[in-house]
Amino acid sequence: MLKRTLAVFLLAAAPLVWAQNVVVGEILEVQNVEGYSYLRLKTAQGDTWAAVPTAKVKKGDKVTIADPMVMNNFESKALKRKFDKVVFGTLASDKAVAAAAAAQPMVPPHALPKGPEAPDAKVPKATGPDARTVGEIMTRPDALKEKTVVVRGKIVKINSGIRGVNWVHLRDGSGSSASGTNDLIVTTKEELKVGDIVTMKGVVRTDKDFGAGYVYKVLVEEGKSQK
């Protein structure tokens, strides 16, 4: 499943084509951030940067990056730098890391191939002092930062099992599709279904950078459904 997802993304992003779908090189530099190791590699195609789940590697090691996915013009806030391109993947020699990546794909939810645009749903606003619409949360992130909110909406999309949680897209008819303020992501460990209308309680987080392309201006974390 992971290979199929990456293959679709690679075609859409038109990245470099690596022989046998792997990148082989010698580590010239290692930079570690939370959750990931960035490796500058000397390869047959030239120097390139790669990112893998945190690994115990050092300068001079020869490594193979499996299931490579190229992201162009990638900015890492954790490293405070922008790369022309970064190859994301897993160390082929690290079975534990590869298994973890298969269970929790590294592809950011916003980078997954998009299906047909889901229509906005007209859903009544939740009740109570913490009740907010999708549009209110998306357009007032600074005012709501680190505050608990309750939002009711229709689930239009779910990306399951990424970084240990499910990424639920909610819409309630508020906000603007042109500005992207009509779609709110709520992360939760609950198993929910697309098409359901749910009321979720969680904490508003802003400017979240999880690394590997997981960058969000606003989202709601620790989501729990309310009756």
Image (tube, grey):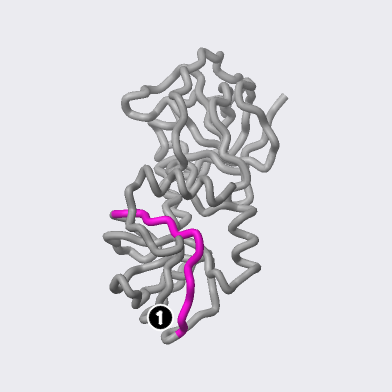
Would residue 109 be found to the left or right of residue 142 on screen?
right
Image quadrant for the C terminus?
top right
Q: Residue at x 51, y 44 (%)?
A: 146
Query: Which amino acid, mark 1?
Result: Glu
Q: Compared to 204, does 209 lie above or below?
A: below
Q: Is residue 150 magenta?
A: no
The answer to whether residue 12 shows anywhere in this view is yes
Location of residue 158 in the rendering, given as x and y in whole percent from the top left corner: 57, 34
Q: Is residue 70 magenta?
A: yes
Identify the main secondary structure in magenta. Answer: strand
SS class of the residue under badge 1? strand
Q: Which residues are magenta?
A: 61-72
User: Quarter of the image holding residue 168?
Assistant: top right
Would residue 114 be found to the left or right of residue 97 on screen?
left
The residue carrying mark 1 is: 26
Q: Residue at x 54, y 73 (%)?
A: 55
Location of residue 44 in the rendering, given as x and y in whole percent from the top left corner: 33, 74
- Total count of labels: 1
| Residue placed most toward the observer, 175 or 88 | 88
| Residue placed most toward the observer, 125 or 185 | 185
Location of residue 40 in the rendering, given as x and y in whole percent from the top left corner: 36, 74
Location of residue 14 in the rendering, given as x and y in whole percent from the top left corner: 32, 48
Determine crowd level at label 1: few under 14, some 14-19, many 20+ residues with C-alpha closer than 10 A. Answer: some
Q: What is the residue that sits farthest to the front in this orientation? A: 20
The answer to whether residue 82 shows anywhere in this view is no
Q: Residue at x 55, y 69 (%)?
A: 92
Q: Residue at x 56, y 22 (%)?
A: 153
User: Quarter of the image holding residue 26?
Assistant: bottom left
